[in-house]
């Protein structure tokens, strides 16, 4: 009985946002077709627009950190959001919510079906969904244009990044590393100039 | 024994899997097919196809499926296979999860630091370029078909792409609803 009451208090005070987050992530995980990037607009709608858990700048920072770290992009994103909101417990629940739907679906397929290459109806559905997924990934570029602080003087940054990855085939990780090092050094130089001015 | 090996292999894949799902698939193939012979190449190709056709991150889907097949192919019953898939998925997610917590802990200390702010504000425009590249990289004949192979499918693909793009951006339609609508359209038009 006491245990039950403890659960209730836990449920009310701490778990509210975690359960809502778990549910949101479960929904996001369930509808993410074609990899982590397609998750960005769905997540933005749920986390930034609907629940207002994070600002749009924060959301962009989440993407950069998730991309810089190894592992599954979508799990990185949800763990980050969970941690920002409710610490380690939030991170665990948010990540679990993202992983669980695909885990259950794949396990069911593995356990029950064997001739999955013969599913023509699924293939037909996916012929329609794939172009939509590409559009889904293109939308945040336009939407985040303003939030990212892109002006006429900085417009070369996203264009050059896109071209380097698309045409030259450089890994996004290296570009992020280069930008971080560049910004750090630039910051150092500015600081030193300030000091010299002060003297 | 196979469970220990599964855990080790997928932990390493999770730890060094930079660059998202598709980079991880080739790592999983290298370990699971080439090195340990848990799966045949044919089985692995099927697994990747199903992973792309079901919701969820591709890295997770492939790990879940490969963990199951590896244990079942080793002669265990299907219930142990379910254990194997849970273990593989857990092992794959664990390193990135721990890394994320450690990095965030360190970042929280310097959250208001001017250098941290500067780095992140420099990263923001880069990320927009990164997402643009991801979308450009997906504009392939596999996703859109091509004028030469099937003009009919190509036109439909272009239409569905534009409809989704405009629908979400200008009319604020929910992305989930848009995906469902395109799935229905694909089913009606191609089946």
Image (cartoon, coloured by chain):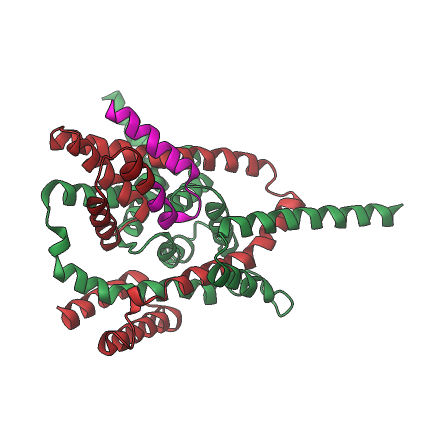
Chain colours: A green, B red
Residue at image coords 58%, 62%: A157
- Residue A14 visible to an observer of this rendering: no
Instruction: Examine the rendered structure and indicate whether residue B73 appears above or below residue A177.
Output: above
Q: Which residue occupies the extreme right position in the image?
A: A199
Query: Which percent across, then down, holds residue A38?
Result: 35, 57
Q: Is residue B16 magenta?
A: yes
B57 and B121: which one is in front? B57
Q: Which residues are magenta?
A: B1-27
Instruction: Examine the rendered structure and indicate whether residue A115 appears above or below residue B109.
Output: below
Residue at image coords 43%, 44%: A81
Instruction: Examine the rendered structure and indicate whether residue A167 appears above or below residue A199.
Output: below
Q: Quadrant of residue A131?
A: bottom left
- Give left or right: position of A137 versus B80: right
Query: Which percent across, then down, holds residue B1?
Result: 25, 22
Q: Quadrant of the C terminus of chain B?
A: bottom left
B133 and A97: which one is in front? B133
Query: Which percent across, then down, holds residue B154?
Result: 27, 75
A91 and B51: which one is in front? B51
- Give left or right: position of B16 versus B160: right
Q: Is residue B58 magenta?
A: no
Residue at image coords 60%, 50%: A178
Query: Which percent across, then down, holds residue A135?
Result: 36, 67
Q: How many callouts does the rendering have?
A: 0
- Give left or right: position of B95 versus B89: right
Residue at image coords 30%, 38%: B34
- Residue B7 visible to an observer of this rendering: yes
What secondary structure do most residues of the magenta stretch adopt? helix
């Amino acid at each position: 009985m006491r245990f039950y009451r403890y659960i209730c208090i836990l449920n009310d005070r701490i778990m509210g946002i975690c359960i809502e987050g778990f549910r949101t992530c479960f929904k996001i995980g369930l509808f993410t077709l074609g990899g982590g990037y397609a998750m960005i607009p769905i997540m933005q709608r749920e986390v930034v627009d609907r629940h207002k858990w994070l600002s749009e700048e924060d959301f962009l920072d989440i993407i950069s950190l998730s991309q810089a770290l190894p592992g599954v992009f979508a799990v990185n994103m949800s763990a980050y959001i969970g941690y920002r909101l409710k610490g380690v417990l939030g991170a665990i629940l948010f990540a679990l919510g993202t992983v669980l739907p695909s885990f259950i679906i794949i396990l069911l397929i593995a356990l029950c079906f064997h001739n999955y290459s013969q599913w023509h109806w699924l293939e037909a559905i996916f012929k329609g969904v794939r172009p939509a997924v590409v559009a889904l990934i293109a939308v945040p570029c336009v939407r985040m244009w303003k939030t990212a602080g892109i002006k006429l003087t900085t417009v070369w940054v996203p264009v050059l990044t896109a071209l380097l990855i698309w045409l030259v085939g450089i890994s996004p990780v290296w570009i992020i590393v280069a930008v971080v090092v560049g910004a750090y050094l630039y910051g150092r130089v500015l600081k030193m100039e300030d000091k010299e001015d002060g003297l | 024994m196979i469970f220990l090996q599964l855990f080790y292999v997928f932990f390493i894949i999770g730890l060094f899997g930079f660059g998202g799902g598709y980079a991880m698939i080739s790592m999983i193939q290298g370990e699971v097919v080439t090195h340990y012979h848990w799966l045949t190449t044919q089985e692995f190709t099927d697994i990747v196809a199903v992973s792309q056709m079901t919701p969820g991150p591709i890295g997770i889907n492939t790990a879940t499926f490969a963990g199951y097949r590896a244990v079942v192919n080793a002669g265990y019953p299907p219930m142990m296979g379910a254990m194997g898939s849970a273990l593989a998925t857990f092992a794959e997610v664990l390193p990135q999860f721990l890394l994320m917590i450690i990095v965030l802990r360190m970042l929280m200390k310097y959250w208001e630091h001017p250098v941290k702010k500067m780095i992140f504000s420099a990263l923001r425009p880069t990320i927009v370029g990164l997402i643009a590249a991801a979308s450009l990289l997906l504009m392939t004949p596999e996703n859109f078909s091509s004028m030469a192979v099937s003009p009919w499918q190509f036109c439909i693909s272009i239409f569905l792409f534009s409809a989704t793009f405009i629908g979400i951006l200008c009319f604020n339609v929910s992305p989930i609803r848009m995906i469902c609508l395109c799935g229905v359209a694909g089913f009606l038009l191609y089946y």
